[in-house]
Amino acid sequence: MHLQFQGAARTVTGSMHMLTVSGQTILLDCGTFHGRRDESYQRNSTFPFDPISISAVVLSHAHIDHSGNLPTLVKKGFRGPIFCTPATRSLCEVMLRDSAFIQEKDAEFVNKKRRKNSLPPIDPLYTVDDVDATIQLFQEASYGKSFEVIDRVECRFEDAGHILGSASVALLLRENSHNTSLAFTGDLGRPHLPILRDPVFIGNGGTTDYLISESTYGGRFHAPVTEMKDQLLEPLLRTCERKGKVVIPAFSVGRTQEIVYVLHELHQEGKLEKIPVYVDSPLSVNVTDVFRRHPECFDEETRTILNSPDNNDPFGFESLTYIRSVEESKRLNDAVGPCIIIAASGMCEAGRVTHHLANSIGDPRNMIMIAGYQAENTLGKKIVMKEPVVNIFGEPYALKAEVVVLNSFSGHADRDELLAYIRKFDHRTLKQVFLVHGDIDQAEKLAAGLQGVGFTAVSIPVRGQKVPLA
């Protein structure tokens, strides 16, 4: 019985962990690695194992760095079940198809350059047909109910509070006459975030022997959730006064819906004038439709709004417009401020937000509002660092727009929230804590914090490391 860490080891991308029990292997997550183009293609197209040898996948949530390489796994021969919550399956149906479209377009772009250099073409990582084959393997499991993954491996999902349908995972492993319990946090959300229920502690089923925990913000602190409205409102009013545009790069799942929800509240309370708000992302539009179909994931406040006699839609208000077509998106270039444009991708690396940034970044009346994690070497990170000149589409642009970072909107638990969650486990019986899904500096800070409160066996595995489970 052993674990092997194949992704999200000392980094925040490409979540994938192999668990072998009684000669069978399951994967915890199968996400795409995001980095420089050549390295990403190599890592994502080549698995360090035979996909046919995998018996099942347990999927924590739908974010692409956790689910995005499932179609490649299926393309290369995997035919086992993929277990997830009902909302995760619904999100994956739209997100993986969107990812396939991006893979196909990326391959077209790369192949144009390769043809000019007389190089053979490359194939997309996967296609929509591969996604369709993948979705057929999904099996839904509700929160709080145990189910069998494979013979001698039992699983239970609990709400992780990170995005719609996200789950922490409890596994009971039986080999010969020996039982071992393993918990995997997935990505943990924050208590009291709007829309979703709070994270549920995964260890309530009894003693936990081993824990795999995320560490994205293991050394950082977020502003309180109660400050979300004020953090958003003050800079919006400032930009409106100078009749500028506010461009918000936002992840299509979770962050876009949270921002729309808070804007809805500000409008309802009369604190924000009815300036035009545009959500310019077909994926965001589709994902918002999925949110509406899964009220079982909502907290009590959101359900109350949905069930109110006024029938207020928390994801819509009078001055909000969802943009689908390319033509409508292009017309926003001529929009006169003040207005708010929310567009993907969240790290500014692709999607329609790059066009809006190119159109807005050089005007000091405008504002770029960053509301999510920005990985190293991304355009979003360079904007956060306020580099005077940034490249967009390979061309230099002077950064003259105001830059505001909203650190209360994070969907990841911060250092204090992670410590509070993990401290609920009994450090006297927990044999080992493995910290993943965090840059090394963040994982090291969280490890030091855990050791300071009695968790002596804390490690930060490297990619490929194999650990026996006694």
Image (cartoon, helix red, strand yellow):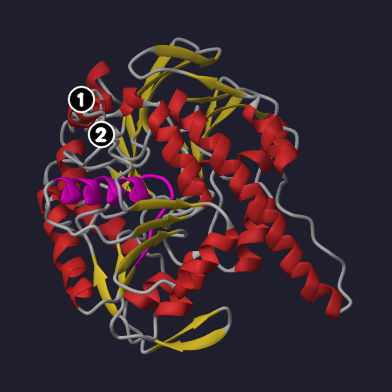
Q: Is residue 285 left or right of residue 134?
A: left
- Image: magenta residue range: 247-268
Question: What residue type is disc 2 on?
Answer: Asn
In this rendering, the count of numbered labels is 2
Residue visible at 30% across and 36% down in the picture: 313
Q: Is residue 87 visible?
A: yes
Question: What residue type is disc 1 on?
Answer: Ser
Assign the magenta stretch its main secondary structure.
helix
Residue visible at 20% across and 23% down in the picture: 309
Q: Quadrant of residue 432?
A: top left
Instruction: Identify whether 41 is placed above or below 305.
Output: below
Residue 308, labelled with which disc?
1
Q: Are marks 1 and 2 in contact (CB under 8 Å)?
A: yes
Q: How far from the left and from the top, in percent, is residue 467? A: 46, 39
Q: CA distance from mark 1 to mark 2?
A: 7 Å
Q: How far from the left and from the top, in percent, is residue 31? A: 53, 45
Say what secondary structure mark 1 lies in: loop
Q: How far from the left and from the top, in percent, is residue 413? A: 24, 47
Residue 416 or residue 4, whichever sits in front? 416
- Within 10 Å of disc 1 (Cα), the crowding (few <14, some 14-19, many 20+) is few
Q: How far from the left and from the top, in percent, is residue 36? A: 57, 69
Q: Is residue 254 left or right of residue 395?
A: left
Residue 82 or residue 174, whichever sits in front? 82
Q: Is residue 249 magenta?
A: yes
> Which residue, given by chain and number where applicable, does mark 2 sit on?
312
Instruction: Identify whether 284 is placed above or below 204.
Output: below
Position of the C terminus by quadrant: top left
